[in-house]
Amino acid sequence: MHNLRAILMIIGSMAFFTVEDMFIKHLSGFMPVGQVLLAIAVASAGIFLLWALLRRDPVFVTRNWRPLILIRASTEAVASVSFVTALSRVEISTVGAVFQSMPLVVTLGAAVFLKEQVGWRRWSAIFVGFIGVLMIIRPGVSGFEPQALWVLVSVVAVATRDLMTRVMDAAVPSTVVSFQAFLAVIPAAMLNLWLSGAAPISPDLPLVFKTLMAILAGAAGYTLIVAGMRLGDASAVTPFRYSRLVFTMIGGVLVFHERPDLMTILGSALIIASGLYSFLRERKRARLDREAIAADLEAPRL
């Protein structure tokens, strides 16, 4: 029963993240991207700082601000700026589809940099997934949208963040990690605003309301995904993170009147299929490793 509740939490978090993305995309049509991101980063940093203080988590102790932790926060800044830039310039369905390749990039990075064992089947899944990405972006053909490359920058940055999280001190509370991430986004957003040359605007009441909705949707999504991942078994809940693409496609069609073409749909299907296959292979390998260790422990000693 706990897995069912966790799955519903994960699906809910993906829906809230999609709502946040839609509000950000809408706001970027009226406000500079840097200003939108700055507003969200300042508010979110405040939310997680308050949350950490209420939980009495050690926020400002030295061990929580070591170089590796700060570098991880900087990858969050790169990911946020590139992702919001992509949302402002590319169809939301395209952004959502390409972003689903992130787990494959994490697997690739784990094999190359962390020396994790990846068999030929998962290498094949990574290759197929990247074919799906190429089908969506289509470099070198008439339908190529160069701005879609911002999504790939975001994917690499998020994958780097996740890989660094694996080797980071697990004693650092998640509230502190989140506060640091949004704190790092603030100067990145200010730099983006300055480099764009766009003058910040004074938002009217509807824009303030939409910005607040984006912030609340993001906070709700984060809360649900943390609760869901802690409550349920990872093997049961992780595949449902792909539901974000379904919500994104629906939002793109209903809200932004997008019409994903056949190549985008097929490419999305390849990305999801290869991601799920890679995850299932990893789970099977982990189970076999546990069984081998158990058998070795139970073997009689001569």
Image: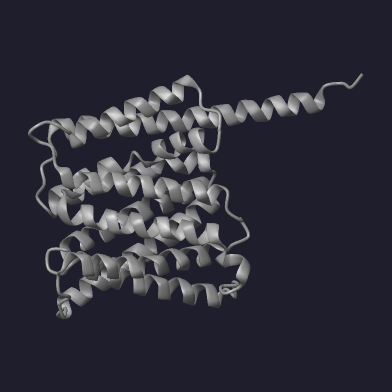
Q: Nearer the viewer, residue 61 or 6?
A: 61
Residue 14 image position (x, y, % from top left): 34, 52
Instruction: Name the residue located 38 percent from the left edge and 70 percent from the top edge.
Output: 44
Kindly indicate the quadrant of the structure image that contains residue 140.
top left
Instruction: Name the residue located 45 percent from the left edge and 21 percent from the top edge.
Output: 121
198 sits left or right of 126 in the view: left
Residue 279 image position (x, y, % from top left): 46, 33
Outermost residue on the left side: it is: 142
Rendered-image quadrant of the C terminus: top right
8 up-or-down from 271: above or below:
below
Q: Nearer the viewer, residue 29 or 139?
A: 139
Examine the rendering and report whether any part of residue 249 can be seen.
no
Examine the rendering and report whether any part of residue 290 can be seen.
yes
Residue 114 image position (x, y, % from top left): 55, 38
134 sits left or right of 109 in the view: left
137 up-or-down from 155: above or below:
above
57 sits left or right of 255 in the view: right
Kindly indicate the quadrant of the structure image that contains residue 25.
bottom left
